[in-house]
Image (cartoon, helix red, strand yellow):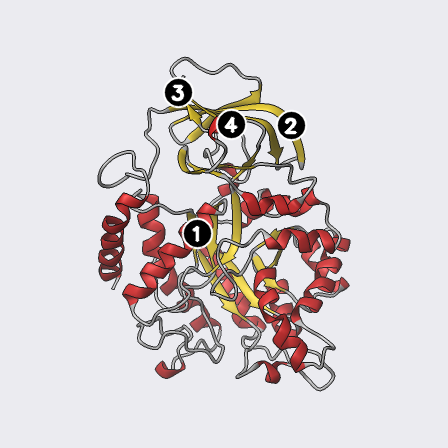
């Protein structure tokens, strides 16, 4: 099956070759030349470490890495100059929760859609993404690998592949999946700590970066998710011992763990077992937030998927409650406790579209963050959430890191909605997009 996925993706690469400028033919065409020397200059740069703007910055790039950065640095002889003029230069953003597969029943159609979605994310300024469930199968592993070797253009990816999912879902019945996944038709489920460990080992053999579990149950229709008093049902789908076994085995094998959880026993199991990326946490109270802080665990806020659910939640509860309302209080509890906030959109479909992740920043500001804090949620905290110590490589514009750079025309600290207007994208020293005014376009030196 892995070979089949690779053939589909290889075919897509041939079809898309004319759509994007390439540096070379064959493998590696979407990677920057190792011997290139480039200077990027802008009036302002967002320092994601301090949350401030610094003026007149120049970034010197050799190959795909940043060789130097500072105010008014001299442009090296022979360097290609990219002058962004009055724009604000920023690090490439990180979305810590996407789903590249958003439709299609065949492996071929899912592969095409997944590629299109991650390219939309890249064009919107998200140079790194964490795919939080392939919805069956491991084509996201192949997509990640083909992007890494330069055959396809797309963001840096870490992937969970197929989640370990006890919920009553069956997304793609014709895609052969793990016996520990989300297909009721196979009659196989994770039951007990030893099966939990076996599920992690199987996923590891498929080449994933992360393990994802679901610890609160979904139901057939939104009406069944709410009690008469407009509180969530939150039926747990895994025991604490099973969650603990997943976390222990994953960490033993060099993987991290994410969980989808809303509240109740399932949420407490994730927090207490030390899950690395706790997503949603809709019923996080002050005590739970303090535990997250004590364990130095972040909260992954996923707003775009909650925006899409707001209307049906309000209808189901007679306007009394919604998952977005719960998320607001949980977020405020986390902020009060000093919990690290990471932004993950949940982008997955037409109702939760890829490429519109910028709409979350305004909501975080509305809930009490400064624009700088909201922006920082897609930078270093998100980089630390990734596996393998990727904080060394992404999340800021600093010497030694990948040359992942974006730019917006205005000042995002004055108006966070400026993030809707990403006009320049560079990933690893390769220009993906440059829609700035002609006077600001690439110039030779």
Circle 4: element type: loop
Earlier sequence position, callout 1 versus callout 4: 1
Which one is earlier in the sequence, the residue at label 1 or at label 3? 1
Question: Which residue is the site of mark 3?
Answer: 444
Q: What is the spatial separation of the Cα atoms under label 1 and label 4, in whole angstroms? A: 28 Å
Residue 36 position in % (x across, y down): 35, 25
Quadrant assignment, res 310 = bottom right
Point 37% across, 74% down: residue: 172
Numbered disc in front, either 2 or 4: 2
Q: How much space separates mark 1 and mark 3, taking CA atoms?
A: 28 Å
Identify the residue position indicated by label 2 in the image: 54
Could you tell me how far apart the alpha carbons at marks 3 and 4 are, in whole angstroms?
A: 23 Å
Q: Is residue 112 visible?
A: yes
* Residue 120 numbered tag: 1
Q: Nearer the viewer, mark 3 or mark 4?
A: 3
Q: Residue at x 74, y 65 (%)?
A: 285
Mark 4 neighbour class, 10 Å CA radius: few under 14, some 14 to 19, many 20 or more = some
Q: Secondary structure at mark 2?
A: strand
Q: Is residue 430 left or right of residue 18?
A: right
Relative vertical location of residue 399 with respect to residue 406 in this rendering, above or below: above
Query: Mark 2 or mark 1, which is nearer to you?
Result: 1
Residue 298 is left or right of residue 289, and the answer is left
- Look at the image and tell me whether residue 288 can be seen: no
Quadrant in which the N terminus is drawn: bottom left
Q: Which residue is mark 4?
A: 399
């Amino acid at each position: 099956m892995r070979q089949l996925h690779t053939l589909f993706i290889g075919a897509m690469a041939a079809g898309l070759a004319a759509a994007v400028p390439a540096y070379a033919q064959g493998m590696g065409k979407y990677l920057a030349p190792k011997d290139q020397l480039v200077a990027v200059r802008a009036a302002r740069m967002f320092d994601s470490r301090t949350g401030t703007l610094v003026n007149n910055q120049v970034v010197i790039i050799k190959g795909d890495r940043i060789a130097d950065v500072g105010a008014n640095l001299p442009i090296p002889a022979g360097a290609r100059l990219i002058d962004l003029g009055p724009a604000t230069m920023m690090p490439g953003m990180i979305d810590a929760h996407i789903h590249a597969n958003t439709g299609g029943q065949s492996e071929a159609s899912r592969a095409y859609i997944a590629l299109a979605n991650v390219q939309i994310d890249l064009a919107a300024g998200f140079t790194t993404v964490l795919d939080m469930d392939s919805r069956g199968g491991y084509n996201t592993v192949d997509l990640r690998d083909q992007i890494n070797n330069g055959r396809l253009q797309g963001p840096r990816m870490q992937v969970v592949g197929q989640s370990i999912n006890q919920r009553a879902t069956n997304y793609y019945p014709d895609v052969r999946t793990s016996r520990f996944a989300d297909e009721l038709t196979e009659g196989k489920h994770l039951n007990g700590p030893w099966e939990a460990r076996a599920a992690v080992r199987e996923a590891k053999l498929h080449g994933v970066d992360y393990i994802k579990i679901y610890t609160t149950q979904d139901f057939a229709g939104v009406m069944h998710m709410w009690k008469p008093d407009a509180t969530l049902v939150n039926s747990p789908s895994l025991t604490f011992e099973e969650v603990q076994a997943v976390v222990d085995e994953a960490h033993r094998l060099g993987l991290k763990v994410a969980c989808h959880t809303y509240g109740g026993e399932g949420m407490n199991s994730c927090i207490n077992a030390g899950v690395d990326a706790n997503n949603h946490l809709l019923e996080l109270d002050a005590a739970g937030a303090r535990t997250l802080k004590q364990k130095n665990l972040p909260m992954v806020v996923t707003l775009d998927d909650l925006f899409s659910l707001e209307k049906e939640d309000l209808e189901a509860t007679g306007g009394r409650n919604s998952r977005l309302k719960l998320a607001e209080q949980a977020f405020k509890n986390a902020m009060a406790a000093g919990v690290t906030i990471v932004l993950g959109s949940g982008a997955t479909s037409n109702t939760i579209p890829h490429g519109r992740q910028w709409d979350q920043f305004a909501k975080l500001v509305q809930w009490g963050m400064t624009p700088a804090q909201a922006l920082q949620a897609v930078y270093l905290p998100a980089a630390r959430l990734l596996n393998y110590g990727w904080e060394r490589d992404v999340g800021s514009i600093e010497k030694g890191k990948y040359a992942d750079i974006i730019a917006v025309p205005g000042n995002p600290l004055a108006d966070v909605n400026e993030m809707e207007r990403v006009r320049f994208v560079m990933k690893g020293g390769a220009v993906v997009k440059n829609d700035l005014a002609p006077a600001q376009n690439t110039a030779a030196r």
